[in-house]
Amino acid sequence: MLQNRKSAVNFCLVLIVLLGAFLRIHTATNTLAEAPLRADAGQYYSYAYNLRFNGVYSHEFWTRSNNPEYRPSADAVRSPGYPLFLLAFVEKSPSLKGILQISLAQAALGIFSLLLVFGIARKILPGAWPLAPTFLTAISPQLVNVETYILSESLFGFLLLLAVYVCTRYKSEDRNSSTLIVAGFLFGIATLVRPTTQYFLPVLLLYVALASRRQLQWQHYAAIACAFILPSALWMLRNLITLGITSDPTLTINTLVHGHYPGMMYNADPATLGYPYRFDPKIQELSSSVSSALSGIWERVVDQPAQYLQWYLLGKPVEFLSWSDASADQGFFTYPALQSPYLSSKFFIFSYVLMRHTHWIWVVLAILASLYLLLKFFKQSNAINATSVLLASVFIYFIGIHSVGFPIARYNTPILALIFILAFLFLHTLTEKIKS
């Protein structure tokens, strides 16, 4: 009986993975964005292009550096994780075929992510329950569509899931911390794709203490910390040798400044929605340095404390966890879509409508699960499942990071799968309590 149930679960998992594969491959091959190498995508592509064809890590736009007499200047504005991923795909003359290859590679990561989601969920959910978050991950329009852009969210989300999955493979009776060292290194690699996780080390070490029941010695913690720090340390060393600095503060400044406008508007003007910094006459002054950004923002907070308190404590988390960005094309597309299954296929449109209308249900359930786990942790930390605490910690960490920085909804896609798992963890816990 048990074997039959396990076989049924595995069969359903195969169907879900096939469905997810179909959605991703069909979307990749049937999506056409207007000017796909614009803005951030153009910068990422230019980094990879310049590195491959000019031997220089520079974001100077590829059309400019395509001139054989032009030598781009090295910089460190963006970390190198995603451009290194693109390195195998960049072409001397970028084409739609090359962009399709990138989309298909990202779709492959998305398909493999479904297995990671199931593997993580199985650590905290019994029986067929892990199929539910895996199914939502498979059909999520946000996760499917983001893989068509030359943006870092898909690779970052995959690495985040892989790191979490490796963490869950550790067993408390295992005195060898090699699994956790690998997980630390993966989190470090993820930091090179998106610096969002650069402050995650204390959370990881807390998980290690819980998972090992505090039985690992300090040398193990040091090794895990070194593995986490190593990728960033190598990047900083490159910057020091090449540029004479350890990091470039440009993105830090932009993150702080661009995200501090209440409601993502300048002076509550709807005409500035999504791009308030473009209308701020003091933007150059605010963006001149990190200290100028912090002092300038603080002056505005002091001038309107209630408005900014509401924005940072409630408005930003809501903005970050929302379905789509305020500036999204047709309320969904990061870049304007000339062609997409989500505009023409009834099945894709149905999945879009379903997930859009249930989006906040999963988010609220994940919040409730995280609050419940935090309360349980402080009451009886020894009895709590370490994996569930890790998922809740990742969720809360990302909310906190984006409440300080730039809270656009596109940035929540890497943790959507974890949100689905937490949501069904809460539903399962509630079901068990009702039964008992």
Image (tube, rainbow, N blue to C red):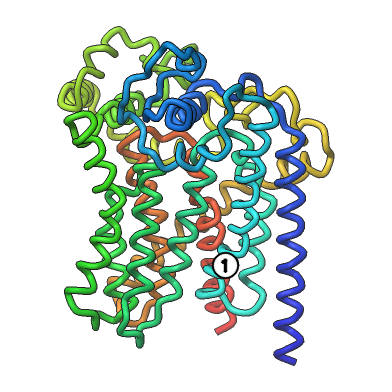
Q: 260 above or below 377?
A: above
Q: 398 above or below 291?
A: below
Q: Residue furthest top?
A: 281
Q: Quadrant of the C terminus?
A: bottom right
Residue occupying the point 32% across, 29% down: 77
Disc 1 marks a residue whose amino acid type is Leu
Residue occupying the point 26% across, 39% down: 238
The x, y position of residue 249, in whole percent, is 25, 29
Left or right, 394 with reference to 152: left
Q: 18 above or below 398?
A: below
Q: How crowded is the residue under tag 1: few (<14 C-alpha within 10 Å), some, or many (20+)?
A: some
The x, y position of residue 161, in whole percent, is 49, 58
Q: Quadrant of residue 54?
A: top left
The residue labelled by disc 1 is: 427
Residue 211 appears in the figure: yes
- Judging depth in this view, the residue of 111 and 82 nearest the camera is 82
Q: Residue furthest bottom?
A: 1
- Judging depth in this view, the residue of 83 and 151 nearest the camera is 83
Badge count? 1
Q: 300 above or below 237?
A: above
Q: Quadrant of the N terminus?
A: bottom right
Residue occupying the point 40% across, 17% down: 276
Residue occupying the point 30% across, 7% down: 281
Q: Residue furthest right?
A: 346
Q: Quadrant of residue 50?
A: top left
The x, y position of residue 176, in whole percent, is 32, 81
Residue 40 appears in the figure: no
- Judging depth in this view, the residue of 198 and 12 nearest the camera is 198
The x, y position of residue 135, in whole percent, is 68, 59
The kind of secondary structure element at disc 1 is: helix
